[in-house]
Amino acid sequence: MSIHNHPKKAKEFVSNDERMHWHDKALWFVREKRDKASKSIPEWEKLREYAQQIKTHTMANLDKYLLEFEENATKRGIKVHFAKDAKEHNEIVYNILKEHQVKKVVKSKSMLTEECHLNPFLEKKGIEVVDTDLGERIVQFRKEPPSHIVLPAIHLKKEDVAKTFHKELGTDENNSDPTYLTRAAREHLRGKFLEADAGITGVNFAIANTGGVVVCTNEGNADMGSSLPKLHIACMGIEKIIPRLQDLSIFTRLLARSATGQPITTYTSHYHGAIENGEMHIVIVDNNRANFLSSNKYKKALNCIRCGACMNTCPVYRRSGGHSYDYVIPGPIGSSLATFRDPKLHKTLSFACSLCGSCSNVCPVKIDLDSQLYNHRQDLYEKNIISTKKRVVMKLSVWVLNSPILFSILGKITRKIVPLIPKKIIYNRFNIWGKQRDIPNMPTKSFKELYKEGSIDVK
């Protein structure tokens, strides 16, 4: 098992300075749209509070609501399956497809099926799987994982897409006009929808008191995939449950505004049974989610509604790209989920955080992401699974910061000595921090000294 290394992957992404700044700017644009959209609703903070309370209540009573959902969905003729892990999920889906002699599947965007590696599993069984979300189809052509949960191809420029479509669809390599590329994709995907034997969709929300599921898309691809083929399979994690239909409006008002700054997604589709002469299945997966419920420090991570707002605002994600996280869900929420699931494999992720708290401030369900990442660092230290270099630095930092006198003395010495040291000595190969940064000019006095003198305006 090779340990995932975020700093190494981030360094590769940052090496293309122009792309890094473009990626940063593109995501900040989405973040600003989110801010404008949230400020258009006076009760925005109340909505966040309600959403947090509903999700927390649901997770505390998850067994009750899952059974209620199963009972109501079954009454509607939907076949409900439970899977304990990814392997069982994939086997259930395959057996349903096998029973119906399915050879071609169209799939709408689903991070759960990415998590379970459903596509390669079905392809090994001889079943063609076509992702129908435009961004997903682009990265599928390129044999890459999504780099963002809402904007899966945000790491690519339109020129990259033009080259990919030229190779896969025979379009003009030099024509990167978005309208031209979108029309080519639409024509290609329409054929796939018409040929498909089955449609697989994700689930944004599953409503316990109706037994129905809700899928939110901007392209209508989930609707095409679930209404043209006679067989529809919806795959969801156990955390997608909400208690009542009236709770849904709170989440739909929060979801699109947090994700892309839209008032609502273009399509918010409700599925309460199969189409005429068709069949509908729902596969509900645990895959290590229940373990979160037993952890006071991390159980709020299960409240996530997958809007991606924490990624759009995160200064580290924006500058390091989604693939540097090496996990199906990148960014702050992905760092917490991955580290909890497998701390050894993802031990660098919780350090890919500036602890600025911006992710927690924009989270529509108020997940304490920065606190969780800070707690992960303590846990990794306690479990002794961080690098020796990091461990020594952390110990020295604790020693210095626990002693105000020592901190003041070292501060005075540093302010005197550093300006006298030649730069070639400061920026040596052992100074990793200084590789990408300039050390700021040393002030003549510390903050504490200025404060005592009354030079700091405390108003």
Image (tube, rainbow, N blue to C red):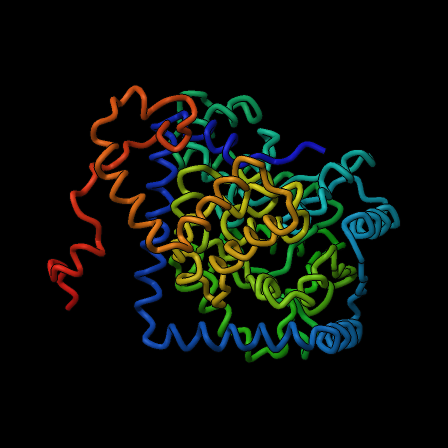
- Looking at the image, which is closer to me, 186 or 303? 303
Please provide percent x and percent y for residue 104: 74, 40
Q: Does the image show residue 110?
A: no
Number of disc labels: 0
- Tell whether 258 sits left or right of 3: left
Question: Compared to 378, does 141 lie above or below?
Answer: above
Question: Compared to 234, does 386 lie above or below?
Answer: above
Please provide percent x and percent y for residue 102: 81, 44
- Tell whether 251 sits left or right of 118: left
Q: Considering the image in quadrants, where does the C terminus appear?
A: bottom left
Q: Does the image show residue 18?
A: yes
- Looking at the image, which is closer to me, 225 or 381? 381
Which quadrant would residue 230 be assigned to in this image?
bottom right
Q: Residue at x 52, y 26 (%)?
A: 164
Q: Residue at x 39, y 57 (%)?
A: 358
Q: Outermost residue, right direction?
A: 99
Please provide percent x and percent y for residue 70: 77, 72
Which quadrant would residue 317 be assigned to in this image?
top left
Which quadrant would residue 404 be assigned to in this image?
bottom left
Q: Residue at x 48, y 53 (%)?
A: 308
Q: Residue at x 52, y 31 (%)?
A: 9
Q: Considering the image in quadrants, where does the N terminus appear?
A: top right
Please provide percent x and percent y for residue 62: 70, 73
- Tell whether 278 sits left or right of 149: right
Question: Compared to 345, does 402 lie above or below?
Answer: below
- Looking at the image, which is closer to me, 106 or 341? 341
